[in-house]
Image (tube, coloured by chain):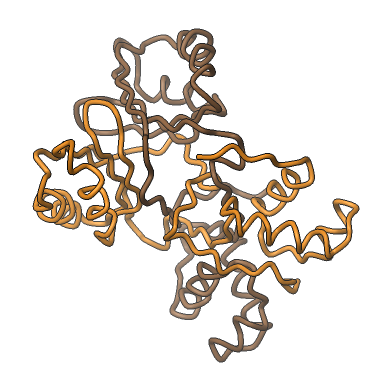
Chain colours: A brown, B orange
Amino acid sequence: MKNDFSFDETDRLIVAELRKNGRATNQQIAERLGLTATTVSSRIRRMEDANQLRVVAVSDFAAHGYDVLMQLAIEVDSRPASEVAHELAQFPEVFAVHIVTGRYDIDALLVLHDFTDMTHFVLDQLSSIRGIRKITPSIAVDILRYKFDVAPIETRD
Amino acid sequence: MATIQLDDLDRQLIELLAKDARVSNRKIATELGVTEGTVRGRIKRLQQERLITFTAITGLQMASNSRLAFIWVQAEVERTREVARQIAEIDPVNAVMITMGSFNIMAMCLFEELDDLVEVASDKILAVPGVHHVETSIAVKTVKYNARVAKITETSPIEGNGTDSDE
């Protein structure tokens, strides 16, 4: 069902308005686009039901007390990379895991409250995963841009 | 990254709004057992402090064949900030951070055609003065991605005014 879905021009215009202000009322969006509030409401519902749209609050790392952002370039040995990736994905501090092409196998983004958290993460969590040969960390010292509005969407429970 | 003190109500609000930002203040107020005015005031404060922003996240269907690439950049150390700023202005680039590690800048970019990635990495980024070397790594599979937590930078929308949204 998900694969049958396609965005038409009206959907795209509504999404553009929601990206500017996700809390705009259906009426405000309708007025701006020359539609009725009912159309706006049913379009949004249709996109949400097809798991192609979520209007959400995105919170800053700081709101969760995360002060350290790191990227981990992981090389895997003697084990399927996807198995290692799935084990990494289970840690809440690891908020993104991708299998990648290039000189390493898995790219993971990690957030920590502070550097003392590193001890627990490295010694208790990472060390429990078999097959990691090498990790090259990069510590983010400044973030100049961070904007993702296309992402895989989970089904709603 | 300053230390910020949030109380339980802030956290509950963030959690609710992360699921669905179009719930009315009235509904949130009922659910959390506070007044609408409190909800409105809290949301406003969280937005002003750039701790939350409201946006629409669309599935990969919207950008039919979107792929993520990590672009690693080695730039002259004394020009790192200036180079990173210029990379952040290249339009398809979604994220730019200055890093300490084998490379001093990492960028992330969503692209549809390989040609688009070549244009960003090999033409635009490599041409920024001060850039010595660029390496790319393409994500072939997303195992986990939490889009609800991010760095809210100046370029993020903050216009969401927290007024009542209708059901």
The quarter of the picture where the C terminus of chain B appears is bottom right
Residue A4, percent from left and from top: 47, 63
Q: Residue at x 69, y 67 (%)?
A: B162
Rendered location of residue B151, percent (x, y): 47, 46
Q: Between residue A114 and residue B94, name the one nearer to us.
A: A114
Q: Along the horizontal axis of the image, is A127 left or right of B92?
A: right
Pick the residue in front: B20 or B4. Answer: B4
User: Farthest residue in the bottom direction?
Assistant: A34
Q: Quadrant of residue A47?
A: bottom right
For residue A41, above or below residue B4:
below
Estimate the x, y position of residue B134 in percent, counting from the top left: 14, 40
Q: Residue at x 23, y 53 (%)?
A: B87
**Is residue B37 found left or right of B16 in the rendered image?**
right
Most foreground residue, A22 or A103:
A22
Question: Vertical placement of B129 versus B73: above or below?
Answer: below
* Badge count: 0
Q: Could you tell me which residue is drawn at 18 percent across and 54 percent down?
A: B120
Rendered residue at 14%/56% (across/down): B124
Q: B102 above or below B68?
A: above
**Residue A73 location, x and y as percent?**
31, 25
Which sits in the foreground, A120 or A130? Answer: A120
Identity of the residue furthest to the front in this view: B78
